[in-house]
Amino acid sequence: MKIRKSTLFLVCPTDCLESTINKEFKGDNLFYSSLVNNSSFCINTVTNLEELVINNNIKEIYFVLSTQNKIILHAMAGQSLAQIRGLQNFDSHIKKNKELSELFWNSNNTTRVIISYFINQKILQLKENFRSDINRLVNIKGKIFSKTENKFINIYSKLVCLNNLNLN
């Protein structure tokens, strides 16, 4: 009997990407959703995710956001998200990253850079919270869905989306 491998996708419910993901990524796909993938990874969430990994033989986890994500676009436009539980500091974080990325990137790439930076941070947070045996079982990656191109794009690497910039 062959053991099936599953993939877990962490998605934002406002993107409505589940059917698109199922068309692109064949196999047993599982979904966990939180607004803009902004889960705090509290102990209960991490424990639930670890149990999902073990019980469903998950080998890959993808954080996925769309370039048309309404929450990110609202935050980039300067609209406050403080009234939405769990997103109180999100808009200021996005605004700061938008300003920094506009200094160093072509404006056509700003949304992808910001999403990549954000997903890289979430990957790091999840890895830090997972038990070491779970980290050895799964590969955690990020994808951006471009509605205009109708395809999934790899996120920019951590090397491109640095936490700090040092200019000499």
Image (cartoon, rainbow, N blue to C red):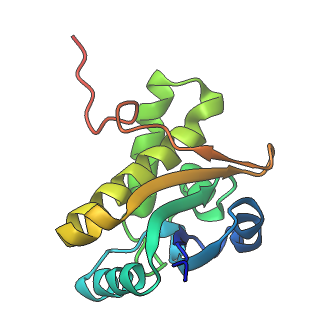
- Tell which residue pokes out farthest to the top in this image: 168
- Tell which residue pokes out farthest to the front in this image: 1
Residue at x 56% of width, y 36% of height: 110
- Judging depth in this view, the residue of 59 and 128 nearest the camera is 59
Quarter holding the N terminus is bottom right
Above or below, 112 relative to 93:
above
Instruction: Please say whether residue 18 is visible from this viewpoint.
Output: yes
Instruction: Please say whether residue 130 is visible from this viewpoint.
Output: no
Residue at x 57% of width, y 57% of height: 72
Residue 73 is drawn in which quadrant?
bottom right
Residue at x 25% of width, y 34% of height: 164
Residue 126 is drawn in which quadrant?
bottom left
Residue 17, percent across and down?
70, 68
Residue 100, percent across and down?
41, 33
Drawn side of residue 60 relative to residue 50, left or right: right
- Judging depth in this view, the residue of 19 and 29 nearest the camera is 29
Above or below, 89 relative to 83:
above
Above or below, 7 relative to 144:
below
- Number of numbered discs visible in the structure rendering: 0
- Judging depth in this view, the residue of 47 and 37 nearest the camera is 47
Residue 168, percent across and down?
21, 10
Drawn side of residue 81 relative to residue 17, left or right: left
Residue at x 76% of width, y 72% of height: 19
Residue 101, percent across and down?
46, 32
Above or below, 5 relative to 98:
below
Residue 9 is drawn in which quadrant?
bottom right
